[in-house]
Amino acid sequence: QVQLVESGGGLVQAGGSLRLSCAASGRSFSIYGMGWFRQATGNEREFVAAIWWSGRVTYYADSVKGRFTISRDNAQNTVYLQMNSLKPEDTAVYYCALKGGFGSLRNTDDYNYWGQGTQVTVSS
């Protein structure tokens, strides 16, 4: 099993920044990807960003491209999401997820493990 614990959420004004962290523990994979998703009240969970284990390939949703950056620290088994120029529409619960093996990283069904989520609220 894999445990994922997110942190770093909070309340921030529009235009501000937050950095989310996701610490992974438990079973290890030789090939894996990690992603961030978010779910606003009343909406479906949507893809935000993802990164492969090498750290060299990343993916972003169009809505966050240029504002958010995903990165990883393999030594710490942690993935980060740096969020800049935040907007009220970024308000959501943000979830970290892990996928073992190759394949797509853009869909919720692609992932094997999920964290509990951390709330991000952006005030206008």
Image (cartoon, rainbow, N blue to C red):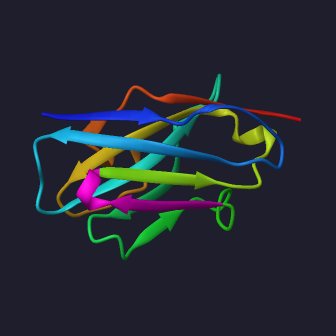
| Dominant secondary structure, magenta | strand
Q: Where is residue 113 drawn, in percent x and y?
A: 26, 37
Q: Where is residue 79 drawn, in percent x and y?
A: 38, 52
The answer to whether residue 102 is left or right of residue 59 is left
Q: Residue at x 40, y 41 (%)?
A: 96
List the single residue furthest toward the bottom.
Answer: 56
Residue 54 vertical placement versus 96 (above, below): below
Q: Where is residue 123 drawn, in percent x and y?
A: 83, 32
- Asked which quadrant contains residue 18, the reply is top right
Q: In the rendered structure, which segment of residues is drawn in magenta? A: 68-77
Residue 93 vertical placement versus 80 (above, below): above
The answer to whether residue 71 is left or right of residue 100 is right
Q: Residue at x 48, y 66 (%)?
A: 59
Q: Residue at x 28, y 52 (%)?
A: 76
Q: Residue at x 66, y 57 (%)?
A: 64
Q: Where is residue 124 drawn, in percent x and y?
A: 89, 35
Task: Say if the magenta span includes residue 100.
Answer: no
Q: Quadrant of the N terminus?
A: top left
Residue 113 vertical placement versus 72 (above, below): above
Task: Say if the magenta span includes residue 76.
Answer: yes
Residue 67 vertical placement versus 57 (above, below): above
